[in-house]
């Protein structure tokens, strides 16, 4: 097939996206596809797949981009890379990539793409709306409240410290803080507000971090995430050796099945398709809570989805080919 891998973009997860895109493009080429790469940030003037741009690796901190120029993305749609492609393989992360925007543009261009459609992408990106849909589907979530227009808490919020403060619509723990006192709240909220106009405040639970990959309507083996620092932050995620991954996670069978079923319920509650990843927290009493569903999870050398696929005997190339097959 003629496949264009779309990566990079405007979000703080740009470097992660470029790394995912490069890995996917390489795997697709090895499988015999005619592959090109497109970056919305470059507009009509794209670069070839062998460009140094696509050999980047995520740093220890997310890059700060000066502007989000969506006009460039519209210019990209007029590129022969898009017009001649039979399928777009999306490895955009964060704003513009996972929020339904690029999906809407590709729908308007009549080009099929991997991952969830416009509505499911937008719902999954909005953590507040996601939680409400998870509750309706019978999936447990952590207590939360929202900060809007500088108002720190709704009056009915009675959560105790510590708390999690994070942007409502970002990934990769961008803008994420653990807050231990009221004196830290303003700083944490300001940090999160750099990335979103809506900030979420969530109950903190010191538990085990679990993640479940969904592929073709099935849950793959659960991965437990054990960061060497206390928090699984951007640095822990994208610095090799900073985090230990246990797959399959060491869980009682009944609990394992319960988490995998909850992952499917959460995925389906948002209307997701093809593949994705649901993240959970497990407390000391073996109660689990769904944190979010990622509709375009990372596909880098340290990413979780390839690790889960490997646990069922799928190589990275097998995984990428399966996603292409689901999107045809």
Image: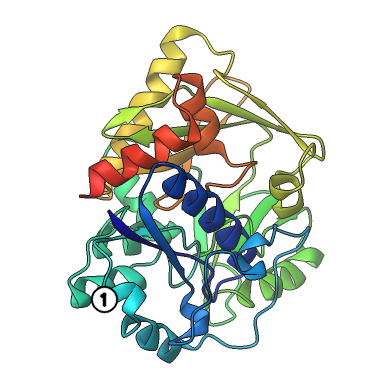
| Residue shown at 75% from the left, 45% from the top | 236
Can residue 65 be seen from the camera position used here? yes
Can residue 292 be seen from the camera position used here? no
Residue under numbered circle 1: 83
Front residue (pair 215, 283): 215
Front residue (pair 27, 297): 27
| Residue shown at 50% from the left, 43% from the top | 142
Front residue (pair 55, 176): 55
The part of the image, by quadrant, that contains residue 58 is bottom right
Residue 298 to residue 127: above or below: above
Residue 237 to residue 2: above or below: above
Q: Position of 318 compared to 233: left or right?
A: left
Q: Position of 326 compared to 39: left or right?
A: left
- Give x and y (percent) for residue 309: 46, 28
Q: How is the image coloured?
A: rainbow
- Give x and y (percent) for residue 282: 56, 28
| Residue shown at 41% from the left, 91% from the top | 71
Front residue (pair 323, 242): 323
């Amino acid at each position: 097939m003629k496949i264009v891998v779309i990566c990079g973009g405007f979000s703080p997860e740009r470097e992660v996206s470029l790394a995912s895109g490069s890995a996917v493009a390489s795997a697709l080429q090895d499988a015999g596809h005619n592959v090109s790469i497109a970056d919305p940030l470059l507009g009509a003037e794209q670069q070839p797949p062998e460009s140094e741009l696509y050999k980047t690796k995520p740093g220890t901190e997310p890059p700060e981009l000066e502007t989000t120029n969506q006009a460039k993305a519209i210019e990209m749609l007029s590129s022969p890379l898009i017009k001649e492609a039979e399928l777009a393989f999306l490895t955009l992360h964060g704003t513009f990539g996972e929020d339904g925007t690029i999906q809407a543009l590709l729908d308007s261009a009549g080009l099929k793409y991997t991952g969830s459609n416009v509505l499911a992408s937008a719902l999954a990106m909005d953590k507040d709306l996601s939680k409400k849909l998870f509750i309706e589907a019978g999936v447990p979530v952590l207590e939360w409240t929202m900060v809007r227009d500088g108002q720190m808490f709704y009056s009915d919020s009675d959560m105790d410290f510590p708390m999690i403060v994070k942007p409502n619509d970002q990934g990769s723990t961008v803008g994420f803080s653990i807050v231990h006192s009221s004196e830290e709240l303003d700083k944490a909220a300001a940090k999160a507000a750099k990335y979103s106009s809506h900030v979420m405040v969530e109950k903190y639970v010191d538990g085990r971090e679990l993640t479940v990959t969904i592929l073709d309507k099935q849950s793959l083996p659960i991965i437990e995430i054990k960061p060497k620092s206390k928090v699984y932050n951007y640095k822990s995620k994208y610095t090799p050796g900073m985090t230990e991954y246990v797959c399959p996670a060491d869980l009682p069978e009944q609990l394992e099945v319960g988490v995998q079923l909850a992952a499917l319920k959460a995925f389906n509650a948002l209307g997701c398709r093809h593949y994705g990843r649901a993240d959970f927290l497990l407390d000391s009493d073996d109660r689990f809570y769904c944190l979010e569903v990622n509709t375009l999870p990372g596909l880098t050398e340290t990413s979780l989805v390839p690790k889960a696929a490997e646990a069922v005997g799928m190589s990275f190339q097998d995984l990428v080919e399966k996603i292409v097959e689901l999107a045809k």
